[in-house]
Amino acid sequence: MEMVPQTISARDYVVIGTLTEDIDPTGNIHLGGTASYAALTAKALGLAVGVLTVATPETDLSQLKDVEVVRLDTAKNSRFENIYTDSGRIQYLYARADDIDLAKLPPVWKTAPIVHVGPLVNEVDPAAIATLREHNFIGLTPQGWMRTWDEDGKIHPIEWDAALETLPLVDATVISAEDVGHDWSYIERWVPYCNILAVTLGRSGVTVYHNGEKRTIPAPTVIESDATGAGDVFASAYFSHMGQHKDPWRAAKFANYVAAHFITQPGFKGWPVDAWAHG
């Protein structure tokens, strides 16, 4: 049985993606996934947020207070472990939740000003993006279509076959250079098909492609505590800013600021309360 709020109201920002169980370095498990990090970012920025997701009935959604969640049932949650090394992040997927049916998107959310599609384990059908064109702004973080995993759960990048058909359907796409193994020739092949492509570079900031122009915007220098979720925080801040101000370069500077300050604290404690002042 799916869970829906008693009343579903219009939302400023809607996120579509699986909620996850993330194993931290101490072995503890906590709520994660693009759906949670992006939703809490948009909420921290003052937006009314909705989430269409898949999770077990036992999943603790208390961290998503004041976020309207439409939860589709699954027998198990997607469970990840992120291991950070000097040469980059190593990811493991130990369990995978069921797919998300976009037909379950509440009608009142179909015209939300901003929708963020954030698959993590290929749980959203790329072809369904075409059904979201009623939205004013569609943001995409396609990492879940760009990975596979072996029998031990170790995640590896793969070619996203539907990329060139899907990218023109969205207003902005955010990926990490790690998603493509830092293969810039791969990234450059995407550029002609993207309205906006933002490639995050960790501590080095982000490279943005738009309308034939390429700019790299550096990130603020901070002391990092926990980088898990930083890419999702960046993407949500970027889409939130773009949805309201339509400036891809200012949005990148703003999202850099939000993501940089997010990683200075563990978990969800790094929200900058004055974020919009830096937009």
Image (cartoon, rainbow, N blue to C red):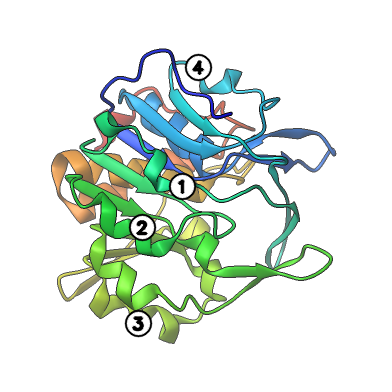
For disc 2, the marked residue is 128
For disc 3, the marked residue is 188
Residue drawn at (59%, 57%), measured in percent from left and top? 121
Q: CA distance from mark 3 to mark 1?
A: 31 Å
Q: CA distance from mark 4 to mark 3?
A: 40 Å
Q: Nearer the viewer, mark 3 or mark 1?
A: 1
Q: Nearer the viewer, mark 3 or mark 2?
A: 2
For disc 1, the marked residue is 101
Circle nearer the N terminus (2, 1): 1
Question: Secondary structure beneath disc 1?
Answer: loop
Q: CA distance from mark 4 to mark 2?
A: 28 Å
Q: Is residue 249 in sight in this rendering?
A: yes
Q: Position of residue 111 (x, y in %)?
A: 20, 37
Q: CA distance from mark 3 to mark 2?
A: 25 Å
Q: Nearer the viewer, mark 1 or mark 4?
A: 1
For disc 4, the marked residue is 65
